[in-house]
C-alpha cells in the first residue's frame, strides 16, 4: 500500500521534507511507517520516545493500522501557546 | 461571524474574539492573550515562527472546547491561534471564555490554555541573538488522563 507521511517542525528540518510517499506492507501500522522513516533518515531516531502520530488528521497510536491512501503525520513534542 | 476555533496567519483581535462568545446571559467574559516575549532561558528573543498541523490543530481546539463544556456546561469558549512569523509583543494565542459568573469563565479559560500547551500540534521556532532553536515541550497525547487532570487542577487552583 501507499501512504503519505507528513513531518513538522524539527522532524521536517532534520529530514529536509514536509511530505513523502512510502510503500508499506499490507499489515502496516503507524510504527511501520516510522521505522521506514528512521531507516531513511537516521538523524530522527532519538525522537522515537517523544513523538506523537496522527492518521488522517486525527491523533492515533503507533499501533494504529494503516490502509492504502492514509496520511500519517509524525509530531515532535508540541510548544503552542 | 467569528469562528470559535480557528488557526491562521492573521493577527489576532482579542476584543472581537471575546465578543464572539458573549451573549445576554453572560455576566463574565475572560480573555487570555499569549504574547511573544523578548527573552527566554537567558536569550534575547528576536521573533518566533509558529508552525502547525492546521487541520489537526483546529479539531484539537474543538476537542478542548468539548472537554471544557463537560466540566463547565454554561461556558462558551473560543480558541484562536496564530501561525507564521510573530513579532515581540504580538499575540500568538487568544482564548475567550464567557459564562453567567466569573468563576467558571476564569477556570475554563485557564483550562483551555493549559490543554493547548499540552496537546495542540503547534510548534515555536525561536530566533534569538546568536541563533535559532525549535522549542519542544510536551509529547501530545489527548488521551493522557494524568495530563488532563493537571490542566484541571491548574484551572481550579
Image: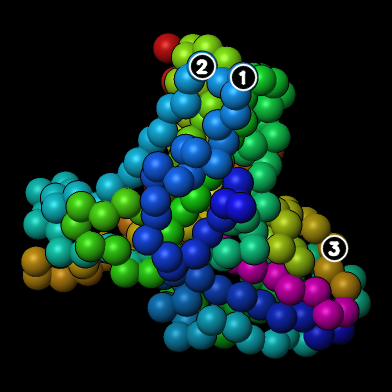
Nearest to the eye among marks 3 and 2: give it: 2
Q: Residue B19: x percent and y percent?
A: 50, 38
| Residue A34 seen in this snapshot | yes
Of residues B108 and B151, the one drawn nearer to the viewer in this rendering: B108
Q: Are marks 3 and 2 in contact (CB under 8 Å)?
A: no
Is B135 situated above or below B64?
below
Q: On the image, numbered disc 2 is attached to which residue?
A: B27
Q: Write the residue at 57% across / 36% down.
A: B21
How crowded pointer 1 is (Cα within 10 Å; few <14, some 14-19, many 20+) is rated as few
Which residue has dot 3 on it? A65
Q: Chain of mark 1?
A: B
What subunit carries mark 2? Answer: B
Name the residue located 61 percent from the left edge and 52 percent from the top edge: B1
Image x and y of residue A3, in percent: 77, 80
Looking at the rendered structure, which numbered label has been put on residue B135? none
Q: Nearer the viewer, residue B93 or B23?
A: B23
Q: Given the image, what chain letter belongs to the residue carrying mark 3?
A: A
Q: Residues within 10 Å of mark 3 (few under 14, many from 20)?
A: some
Can I make out residue A77 in this image? no
Residue A72 shown in magenta: yes
Q: CA distance from mark 1 to mark 2?
A: 7 Å
Colour scheme employed for the rendering of this structure:
rainbow
What numbered label is drawn on residue B25? 1
Boundaries of the magenta span: A68-75
Q: Are marks 1 and 2 in contact (CB under 8 Å)?
A: yes
Amino acid at each position: 500500500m501507499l501512504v503519505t507521511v507528513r513531518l513538522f517542525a524539527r522532524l521536517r528540518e532534520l529530514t529536509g521534507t514536509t511530505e513523502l510517499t512510502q510503500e508499506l506492507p499490507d499489515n502496516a501500522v503507524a510504527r511501520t511507517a516510522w521505522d521506514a522513516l528512521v531507516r531513511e533518515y537516521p538523524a530522527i531516531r532519538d525522537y522515537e520516545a517523544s513523538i506523537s502520530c496522527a492518521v488522517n488528521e486525527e491523533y492515533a497510536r503507533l499501533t494504529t493500522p494503516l490502509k492504502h491512501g492514509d496520511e500519517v503525520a509524525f509530531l515532535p513534542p508540541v510548544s503552542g501557546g | 461571524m467569528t469562528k470559535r476555533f480557528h488557526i491562521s496567519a492573521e493577527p489576532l483581535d482579542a476584543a472581537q474574539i471575546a465578543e464572539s462568545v458573549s451573549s445576554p446571559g453572560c455576566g463574565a467574559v475572560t480573555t487570555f492573550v499569549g504574547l511573544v516575549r523578548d527573552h527566554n532561558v537567558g536569550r534575547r528573543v528576536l521573533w518566533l515562527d509558529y508552525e502547525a498541523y492546521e487541520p489537526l490543530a483546529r479539531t484539537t481546539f474543538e476537542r478542548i472546547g468539548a472537554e471544557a463544556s463537560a466540566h463547565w456546561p454554561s461556558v462558551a469558549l473560543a480558541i484562536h491561534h496564530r501561525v507564521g512569523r510573530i513579532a515581540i509583543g504580538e499575540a500568538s494565542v487568544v482564548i475567550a471564555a464567557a459564562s453567567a459568573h466569573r468563576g467558571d469563565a476564569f477556570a475554563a479559560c485557564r483550562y483551555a490554555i493549559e490543554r493547548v500547551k499540552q496537546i495542540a500540534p503547534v510548534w515555536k521556532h525561536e530566533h534569538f541573538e546568536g541563533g535559532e532553536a525549535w522549542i519542544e515541550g510536551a509529547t501530545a497525547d489527548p488521551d493522557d488522563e494524568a495530563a488532563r487532570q493537571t490542566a484541571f487542577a491548574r484551572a481550579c487552583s
